[in-house]
Image (cartoon, rainbow, N blue to C red):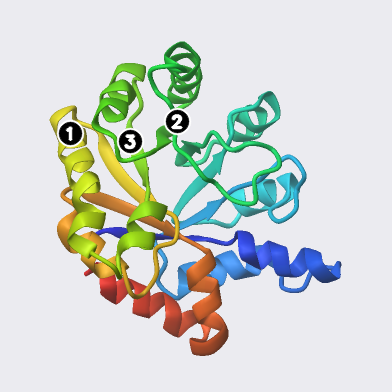
């Protein structure tokens, strides 16, 4: 079964909009796990507009499933990851002012940088994953930098799903097969929801984990958090 990691950034966004500590991010993470999530994902950004660095330290104390920290590997981010030592660090090349992640790595252009960062993290026992567009040559580059996994950036799939789902998923299948060829683990994330998740899971070979935040939290407003997590888990069986 493909694992579901719940990205709780939007919980922090809601808290920060009002100030104070409601909703409580740590309690939300514990509840997500209690309701069946197999991992918790956070993506702290330099401006701390949602998850704050302090949240990450606090979550380390309570997360009992897989803890995944995403972000651009700046010095501050790398210090945080090295301090917390999550199960997985997902490296994302997002600009500081990006509203959300919008592109994968150029693994060929940034080969030396990624190789050094990945080795640093792996020496601490942290599994590494790099955010990647579904391009075969970039998957080959990912293998060369030594990462454990790749996370396919699925916005293009989600955008094209209702128009032509076979065409939308085609480059992802090729990328997934290339990842298997090189022995890379496979994750996926971005704009996945209850409409498009099952088709992705059924057709993407070797998919180990998806991280979902925005759509899941939006659905929880209507269905409740516990029921929503169960709905997503059913899509992954």
Q: Which residue is mark 2?
A: 105
Q: Which residue is mark 1?
A: 178
Residue 221 found in image quarter: bottom right
Of pointers 3 and 2, the one earlier in the residue sequence: 2
Of pointers 1 and 3, the one earlier in the residue sequence: 3
How far separated are the C-alphas under marks 3 and 2? 13 Å
Q: Position of residue 117 (x, y in %)?
A: 50, 20
Above or below: residue 228 compared with residue 115: below
Query: What residue is rendered at 53% in x and 88% in y?
Result: 222
Q: Position of residue 67 (x, y in %)?
A: 49, 49
- In the structure shown, which secondary structural element does the residue marked by tag 1 occupy? helix
Of pointers 2 and 1, the one earlier in the residue sequence: 2
Q: Horizontally, is 77 left or right of 89 in the view? A: right
In the drawing, what numbered circle is on residue 149?
3
Residue 65 found in image quarter: bottom left
Neighbourhood count class around disc 2 (C-alpha, 10 Å): few under 14, some 14–19, many 20 upward: many
Quarter occupied by the C terminus: bottom left
- The outermost residue toward the front is 163
Neighbourhood count class around disc 3 (C-alpha, 10 Å): few under 14, some 14–19, many 20 upward: many
Q: Horizontally, is 81 left or right of 204 in the view? A: right
The residue lying toward the viewer, choosing from 84 and 151, is 151
Residue 158 found in image quarter: bottom left
How far separated are the C-alphas under marks 1 and 3? 12 Å
Cβ atoms at labels 1 and 3 below 8 Å apart = no
């Amino acid at each position: 079964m493909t694992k579901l990691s719940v990205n709780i950034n939007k919980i922090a966004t809601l808290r920060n909009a009002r100030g104070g500590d409601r909703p409580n991010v740590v309690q939300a993470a514990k509840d997500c796990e209690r309701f069946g999530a197999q991992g918790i994902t956070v993506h702290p950004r330099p401006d701390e507009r949602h998850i704050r660095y302090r949240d990450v330290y606090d979550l380390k104390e309570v997360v009992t499933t897989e803890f995944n920290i995403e972000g651009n590997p700046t010095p501050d981010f790398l210090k945080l990851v090295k301090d917390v030592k999550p199960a997985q660090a997902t490296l994302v090349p997002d600009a500081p002012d990006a509203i959300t992640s919008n592109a994968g790595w150029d693994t060929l252009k940034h080969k030396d940088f990624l190789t050094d960062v990945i080795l640093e993290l792996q020496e601490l026992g942290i599994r590494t994953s790099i955010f990647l567009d579904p391009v075969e040559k970039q998957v080959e580059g990912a293998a060369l930098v030594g990462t454990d996994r790749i996370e396919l950036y699925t916005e293009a799939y989600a955008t094209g799903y209702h128009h032509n789902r076979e065409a939308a998923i085609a480059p992802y299948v090729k990328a997934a097969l290339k990842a298997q060829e090189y022995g890379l683990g496979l994750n996926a994330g971005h704009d996945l929801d209850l409409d498009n998740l099952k088709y992705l899971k059924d057709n993407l070979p070797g998919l180990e984990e998806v991280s979902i935040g925005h759509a899941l939290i939006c659905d929880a407003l209507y269905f409740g958090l516990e029921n929503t997590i169960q709905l997503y888990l059913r899509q992954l069986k």
